Amino acid sequence: MALMDYMRAKAILDKYKIRSVPSRYVSSAEQAVSFAGRDSIALKLLSDKVLHKSRAGLVKLNLSGAGEIGRAFGELKRKGRGIRQYRIIAQKMAKPGVEAIIGGNTDPQFGKVLLLGLGGVYVEAFGDTQLRLCPITKYDAGQMIDGLRSKDILTGNGKSRDMLVELLMQASRLLTNNPRIKELDLNPVILRDGSYDAVDIRVLV
Amino acid sequence: MKADLNTLLKPKAVAIIGASRNPDKVGNVILKNYIDGGYGGRLYPVNPNADSVLGLKAYRSVLDVPETVDVAVIAVPAQIVPGVLEECGQAKVRSLVVVSGGFAEVGETELQDRIVKIARKYGMPMIGPNCLGVMDTRSRTDTLFLPTYKITRPQVGFVSFISQSGAVGSTVLDVIAGEGFGLSKFISYGNAADLDEVDLLQYLMDDEETKVIVMYIEGIKRGKEFVELARKITRKKPVIVLKAGRTSAGSSAAHSHTAALAGDYAVQEAMFRQFGFTVANDLSELIYFSKIFASETEPRGNRIAVVTNGGGAGVLTADAIASSKRLRMAELSAKTSRALRGRMPKLVNIRMPLDLAGDADEKRYGDAITAISGDPNTDMLVIIVLYQTPGADSTVSAAIVHLKEVVDKPIVVMSTGVGYTQAQKVQLESGGVPVYDSPAALVSSLEALLEHAEYLETHK
């Protein structure tokens, strides 16, 4: 299996109306600064050799201004020397919220499987996740949410719940319609009152 | 392939190949069980070294048996099974139960492939190898090589149980025999070389003698076919599943978080829940859930009324109900409260849980249950009977069984004890009233019942 190029993966999500933060590859600190404009950005080193980016110190968050962005870019470049193939991506910072994981996998017996859980660093700490075979129904999506111990954290109100149901349905469609995609990680997806942004995307083909 | 399991389960003529004269041998025990169990069909022991076994004329080969048999039960060493199956094919045997072990489970996959090939060549559906085989409490076919003095056979009922493992299967059977709800069919299918869980479930889905299906499963052989069947089966009857392999860790070499979190067990458990199976976490839950579904009642809501003859037991049960995410305690309507006040002695406080006091007899229980079951604020009734008290005896059990017939709401009993209590439990369960010995068991069973009802409601 191979990691799909980030921007291609993002384009597939766009097609399924799954929102993700504005992103672009940068090959210099200047490019990153101009992409940032007045916003704060994140810089990440992407490589299919690395799964736990933040643990490896390859994620720099909340950067603004030429000095800060430049220093972070330089540091990632240095770390990249040990990793043969990599790219650096700049992303607009998402507004803060609750982190969820939405994912997909291919089970050898049952085919595409959709996952929802409390995301970010909590995925492994709590293992609070729900799985369903694809394609899911609206009922299944609701059951996935209700089956989480963290459901009240993820969906504060009815509006957030409806949004999450729709997002799960779209992710299920994406997985079902694209047999090439073997695994999918949207982790984290940042949820806040009726809106969300997928912040990190991994698609394996 | 849709196998006709009727031939296997309702045979008119059975050959037992490997019917030894030695009472310690599997073939001997099987034949003896057929004889002792009151099987009404014709029995043909096959043994090349004996003229008779257990008083029945023995045959040198299945080819010598004077009629075409519906089932040949094979209990001979693995190496000679292929030859025996060839003879069965030539004798036009209609179906096979291969009890013998020594096949894929010990790495002899080629030998197993050979016997499957022979069975299919002659169109003989096969259970096994490496299994206990089949049991049907109505036809009294019973290929289990477990002596009846060591494991009592369950009474006739409507729960059917399939098990990949013979050991788990026989343990559960033993426990079911001590419960009052009974059994319809038991199939231990071992290596599932020919007939597998999909075939068995397909048959039980349409079987009129089966109202609840229980399964113990280690692995699923045909995922796609299983899912196709899973979508249909739970809408027809409840299916309780105990799946082994919870602890098998997800692949550590996974490429993504999702893959690491979506291991075999997690996916299968999710699939079971998605399609409305009732997942049991252990053998105890498997029994608990079986009896609630066997009672064939449908809850219309989650409000539980509790009636008791012991204050402490009432409080413990109320605690368990209040701690449940799905259930809640019922609140009696003013009308019901008035009716109860008129009928109950002064020392009974009219509130939930309703404590009838230690001297409650069948009349007090009957009056209380009648009043509460008519209350629109109550969906299910939990009746606690501590049979250790003077007033509680079999007349209370009889009153509850009678009320179960006339009340249109689930009624379950909680009763803890041995000896006398155990006898009352069997009386209640034979009358269709499930009995639990702890609030936790009761609550998880009512939750399972409710969850299944909700699944049906949302999957019309």
Image (cartoon, coloured by chain):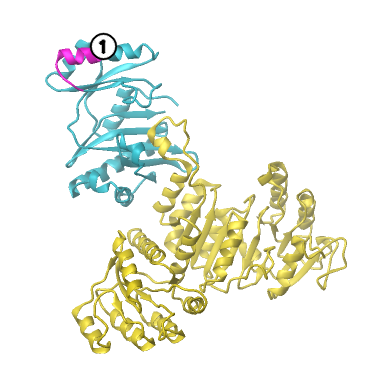
Quadrant location of the C terminus of chain B in the rendered image = bottom left
Q: Colour of chain A?
A: cyan
Q: Amino acid at mark 1?
A: Gly
Which quadrant would residue B42 be assigned to in this image? bottom right
- Residue A9 drawn at (x, y percent): 32, 27
The numbered mark 1 sits on a residue in which chain?
A
Q: Is residue A115 above or below residue B55?
A: above
Q: Colour of chain B?
A: yellow
Residue appearing at x 37%, y 73% in the figure: B410
- Residue A191 drawn at (x, y percent): 22, 38
> Under tag 1, what secondary structure?
helix
Q: Nearer the viewer, residue A95 or B393?
A: B393
* Residue B237 seen in the current view: no
Residue appearing at x 34%, y 38% in the figure: A125
Q: Residues within 10 Å of mark 1 (few under 14, many from 20)?
A: few
Verify whether residue B287 appears in magenta: no
Verify whether residue A63 appears in magenta: yes
Asked whether, in this view, residue B136 is left or right of residue B46, the answer is left
Q: Is residue A177 above or below residue A165?
A: above
- Residue B379 drawn at (x, y percent): 30, 72
Query: Which span of residues is magenta-colored?
Result: A62-74
| Residue of label 1 | A74
Q: Is residue B224 above or below residue B389?
A: above
Q: Nearer the viewer, residue B230 or B58?
A: B58
